[in-house]
Structures are given as C-alpha cells and as structure tokens.
Image (cartoon, rainbow, N blue to C red):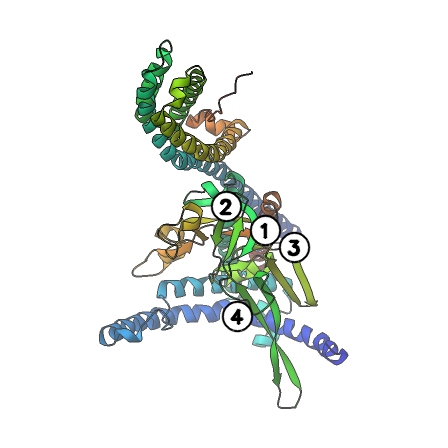
Amino acid sequence: MSVLKIGLFILLAPLVIYMLVFILPAMPLLFGLVVISGFVILPLRQLFVRWVKRVNPRALDPDDRFIPWPEYWSAAFRIMLGFGAVAAVARLAFWTSYGRLFIGKDTRNLIFATELDYVMAGCGLLYAFLSYMQEGRWLYSEVLAVRNLPTSAVASVAPGLAELSGIVKHSGSRELRLNSDRTVMSFLWDLAGTKRNPDGKTTEIGTYKKEMSKFYLDDGSGAILIDPDHPGVELRRPFITILSNWFGSRAFEILLTRHVERISWHRKKYELKEGDRVFVVGNVEIDPSALPDAAAPERFVVRPRPEARSGKESILQFLVPGRTPSRTTYDIFIISDTDETRAEALLRRNYYFSVCVSAVLAILSAALIVVSGSMPR
Amino acid sequence: MRYDSIGDIMKSGIFLIISVILLFLTLGGIGYIISLFNSLIQVRNNIGKAWHNIDVLLLQRNEEIPKLIDVTKAYVQYEKGILESLTRLRALFPSARRTDQKTKIENELEEKMHGLKAVWEGYPDLKANELFLKIQQRITELESAIADRRTFFNETVTIYNIQREVFPQVVFAWMLGFRHHPLLEVPKKKKP
C-alpha cells in the first residue's frame, strides 16, 4: 500500500467513524420501520410464494432465493437489536455531540429524546441477554462436550457425537485451488481483484475465500472420513464470530493455529495440511456413499449434523405471528490442529470473550438509562 | 425522574450499575449451577452410549458361552462349579437393567472365563477338540474387539466418577442419587 493511500486512510477514517456515530443511533428507528413494514410485506410475499408453488412449483426450488420468513424475521430482529446495542454505547460515548450533525439539533432538547434513549438502552440490554443465550451458551456446550467426551479409537467408534484425535490424510476428493494438494482446509482473506475508478485509479477489492475438502483422520487403529464442507463451518476468530452472530449467523469451530501465514497487514491465511495432528469433535454417522459391505470405520463419516430442534431454541420466533416451524441447526462440530487441552482452552477463551462483550453491553446500556433519565434537558 | 444535585445522580447511577452487575452475577451463578447439572447428566448419558457400543459384542460373546460349556463338560471332571457359575451369570446378564449392574455381572463373568481358561490347560484332549478350537477362536476375536471398546467405556466411566466426586458436583450427585459406577475390569493374569 502506498504512502498516499495510508495518508488518505488516516484522513478518511475519522470521517467514517464520525458518520457511523450519527447514523448508528438512528438505525433502531430505521429497522423498526423495516420490521413494521415486514408485518405487511412478508405475509403478502408468503401468499405470493404459495401461489407460485401452486401455479409453477418448479419456480421455487431450494435456490429460488425465497427465504423462509421466520428466519428472515429472526435475522432482522437480531440486526435491529445489534444496532440498538451499538447505538446505546455510541450515544453514551458521544453524549453532547449526539445527533447535532445528523438531525441538526442537540438531541438533549428534542421531544422524546429520553424515550429514544430508553429504547436504545432496552435494545442493548435485550441484545446482551440474547447474545449470551445464543453465542455464550453454545460455546459453553462445546467446552462441556470437549471436557466430557473421552477420545474414541477410530476402529471402535460408534455413531453419535464422538471425539477423535489423529493425523490428517488427504482423501483425494478434490483439488484445492488455493494451495498445494497437501492442504485440506484453507481460509484466506485475500485480494479478489482491482476495480478501475472513473478517475483512472484502481481500488483493491478484498474477498474471503474458504476451501475445504473431505479428509481422513488416522489414529493408528483405523481411518475415518471427516467431511467439514458445509456453509455453516467457519474459522473461529472471536471478534469476527461475535459480529457475525450479531448479524444472524452462527459460525462453527475451526481452530487453526499451526499454519497461519500473514500475507499483509490485513490478510491472513489459515491452513490445515496433510500430516497435521488434528482433534475433531463431531457427529459420526453412516456415510450413504460408502460401499455396502464396508467395515465399521469405512462406513462412517463425521460431519455437522442437521437437526430439527423445538421452537424453544429460537425464542425470537415467539415474537413472530403465525406458524413457528422448528429451526434447522447443527450439532457440535469442532476441528482443531491443537491437542484436546489447547482446544478446550481456546473454546473457553472464546466463551469468556463472548460473556465479557455481553456484560459490557449490558452495563453501558444501564448507564445510558441513568444518564438520560437524570440529566437536565 | 429528576435529581437536585450531581451527587444524587452519581448515587443513582452507581446503584443501577451495581444492580446490573449483581443481576449478571446472579444470572451467571444460576447458569453455572445449571451447567454443572447438565454436565453431570451429560457424562451419565455418555456411559449409556459407551455401554451400547460394547453391549452388542458382550451379548455375542455370551451367546458362545453355552456352546463352550457343552464342549467343556465332556472333558472337565472336577471344575463343575465354574461352569455352573458361568451359566448362572450368563442368564443374569440380560435381566440386569442398569449399566452398573451389568458391569458388575460382566466383571464376574470375565473372571470366571479367565478361571475356565486356566482349567483348559490341564486338559490336552479338550484343547485338541476341533469344535472347542472353533468356539475359542470366535470368543478370542470377540474379546479382542471388546478390549478396544472397554478402554473407551472405562474412560467414559472415569470422567463420570471424577465429576461426581469433585466439589461442587458432589452435592448434585448426592441429591440426585448418582452412584459410583464400576469399571469394566481386565482379569489379572496369574503369576507363573
């Protein structure tokens, strides 16, 4: 990166931060409008989907981009709460300057200013609670699984949740484009290309590449197929993961520490290679593609398990009118290139991080209620 | 609510923040207790799962025992007690409901089987019997598979036993009646 670009970044960064400070507090209101309009739009859309299904079922295959609406609702609600939570913190941090640029007045003198603060703080408190219930509780269940499960020998592994440890062997299922054929998993924040601007200059476009192939885990007693290739399986990076959770998705646990290559200041590559020691916790199930007469470990595959859970898992669905179908979620799935103790420590660290984020949000949101309710207007 | 002085505001603010912290600590404490309870339930259920993994093989091995007894009876004169014990234990095994009961029966059965193997040494004619060799080979194969799964089962049981004995889980274990679970023992070899 040239000196000019660094200079430009230094100049623009405060402006971007300043804009965020004024736009973010308005986000709960904007998303509130979206949610309210959703009460009208989504049922209409649902009717339209039903009609399309009746008239032309082929038009609605799994990739037709029609998102099941309770999921959409859940994501929209979480995004709103997420912005609310950030807004509460921003409101508190920039108390005196808040809204001056965005609305043109000091919001301390605006009508309903206190009530708006209470809404923001309420969003923050609610989000802190929901964040713990979803992210924190899930991480803790992973810690428990690692601690409570003994390591199975591949030769005598049984179907169900199992903990395995061994050496990575390439299954030869497919070549990875990112690296040599020794790599079985690769996560890379890379340069996708450059875009030419109207002024003739070029802008770099970054991208996130994820490549995974099936591989065998060999512990000396036998080899078992591991199939991590699923959209929900992600590299665990504490802050990024919590952010992604705020926006409605849940990452699963790929904890890679051995082959981490820093390509530039903002680009890193994480890899798992053939010959690495690997620790896996996942669901062992019968592989439909295995040969019918295959013996026990060859018949099995370890992969994230789709599991329909009851509505209580998704408390947000109670807020949605109409049907609440069971949500598809995935059971515990962890791949780490560390040993069991280190993997548990990493998971525990992520858990504490998640709890701390929730606690800080809750305390700051409570502080906003105090400040807003007590300050003279 | 309005306040007359900054001091009042500070007091109110500190009170609310302390309340939130206390609420978090309380919720955290409740969560911790729930997680302890869930952890105990999880390790107990893991024993059931590990048992199902080995149970199939034990039943298969036990099905071979009557055949072995029938062959042995014709040769063995003075060790009828061992054969009767084996028959009794084999019959008891399917009727036991809990895994700890089954484990105890299996441990006794394994000990008797080991005793029987020592008896065979004194009967060369029996060891030359073709049917006997066939059954013995089948049992040896099954016991080899059992040995792999026994290790996993014992590790599962050890995790359970440790959890139910450490504080504060011991309180829950005592309240819920979680008893010590025996291990599947490997018979000790006699000294030459």
Q: CA distance from mark 2 to mark 3?
A: 24 Å
Q: Earlier in the sequence, mark 2 or mark 4?
A: 4
For the residue pair A125 and A255, the one nearer the viewer reads as A255
Q: Earlier in the sequence, mark 1 or mark 2?
A: 2
Residue A222 has which mark? 2
Amino acid tagged 2: Gly
Per the image, label 3 sits on a secondary structure element best described as: loop
For the residue pair A365 and A140, the one nearer the viewer reads as A140
Q: Residue furthest bottom?
A: A199
Q: Earlier in the sequence, mark 4 or mark 3?
A: 4
Question: Is residue A331 depicted above or below A104 in this figure?
Answer: above
Q: Name the chain under label 3.
A: A
Q: CA distance from mark 3 to mark 1?
A: 18 Å
Query: Are the residues under marks 3 and 1 on the same chain?
Result: yes
Amino acid tagged 3: Arg
Q: Residues within 10 Å of mark 3 (few under 14, many from 20)?
A: some
Single out the mark in the foreground, 1 or 2.
2
Q: Name the chain under label 1.
A: A
